[in-house]
Image (cartoon, rainbow, N blue to C red):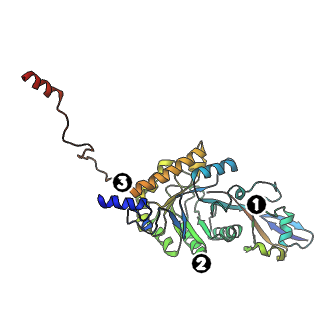
Amino acid sequence: MIQLTINGQPQQFESPINLTQLVEHLALQGKRIAIERNGEIVARSQFAVQMLEHGDQLEIVVAVGGG
Amino acid sequence: MAINLKLWLLWVEGKTVPTTNRSHSQESMDNLVIAGKTYTSRLLVGTGKYKDFNETRMAIEASGAEIITVAIRRTNIGQNANEPNLLDVLPPSRYTLLPNTAGCYTVDDAVRTLRLARELLDGHSLVKLEVLGDPRTLYPNMVETLKAAEILIKEDFQVMVYTSDDPIIAKQLEEMGCVAVMPLASLIGSGMGILNPWNLQIIIDNAKIPVLVDAGVGTASDATIAMELGCDGVLMNTAIAAATNPVLMASAMKKAVESGREAFLAGRMPKKLYSASPSSPVDGVIAPASDAATRKAAQ
């Protein structure tokens, strides 16, 4: 069991998970997003090889209207 | 006069422009150049506060803007996966997206937000930096802004920076490598117009990079005044989005910016309280009717 904090919300996962799997789990595949893991940007090309660890803090962002 | 006319004709032909102003003499046409890229529109617009994406799209089309700001925010987790995305409506293939750091009050938040933006936009490095100091006024914290700008420039971002209208700070931001300085006309979202044209004038006179008024424009005449001062462009959001008819106001702003720019290039007449120089000839005015009557009576 690992716990991740995603956009400030804690979420538990039964088994180890990489970023590609997390993106699919959150139904964000194909969306234009960017992810920061523990304060560091993760390039999209690295999603499949980034295994997430218990306690990881993730920020998943999109572009929204703003001035 | 003859020289001015000649310069004007050359300018019309696109060979030169009729002033010695820094930003014009470098350009063959009267375009806005930011970080080496040329834009024909001098109006930059935000994408916030519209009632829906359709209104956003129509207003931005009416504005003629080529550079549009976007904010970077957490995505909704597990809610409405089919929610439309802003970038589907305003594709990066058509617009130059300018991600901002609105809502950031620290150097760290601003820098991380723009790193995320660069990843989100496939390495796009032109950004709008703003580090706010106070939630009530949204006034920029220039101490933190200078620190954030330094980090971002080291990381090869092209930084357009929101700043107070302090000429010394504006110059420092230029010297450290920002690609444009964007002083406020008045507070963000206030619509109060240009409160200190004299400071803006000093910033413009000192700058070798584009100066854009960002924040405070309320209506078309405010944008025109900014451009008449010699600003290279104007960035606005609320003035359009909070108008009763945003699409019509977007069109008005397009014309206002173009109009102010042309008036600046044309060079206004000097102001004087009394002219003593009527526009029509002084000589040859017909005689008063009473004179004619007198002459006729004498015959």
Q: Classify the position of the N terminus of chain A by image quarter.
A: bottom right
Q: Do labels 2 and 1 share a chain?
A: yes
Give the x, y percent position of residue B157: 61, 73
Q: Mark 3 points at which residue?
A: B268
Q: Specify the subunit that label 1 lies on.
A: B
Asked whether residue B195 is in view, the answer is no
Q: Classify the position of the C terminus of chain A by image quarter.
A: bottom right
Circle 1 Cα neighbour tier, 10 Å, few/some/many (<14 / 14–19 / ≥20): some
Three-letter amino acid code at the position of disc 1: Thr
Q: Give the answer, above or below, for where B81 lies relative to A51.
A: above
Q: Name the residue under label 2.
A: B154
Q: Give the answer, above or below, for where B145 lies relative to B278.
A: below
Mark 1 or mark 3, earlier in chain: 1
Camera-side residue of A1 and B282: B282
Q: Circle 1 — which element? A: loop
Between marks 1 and 3, how big is the CA–CA gap?
A: 50 Å
Asked whether residue A43 is in view, the answer is yes
Three-letter amino acid code at the position of disc 3: Arg
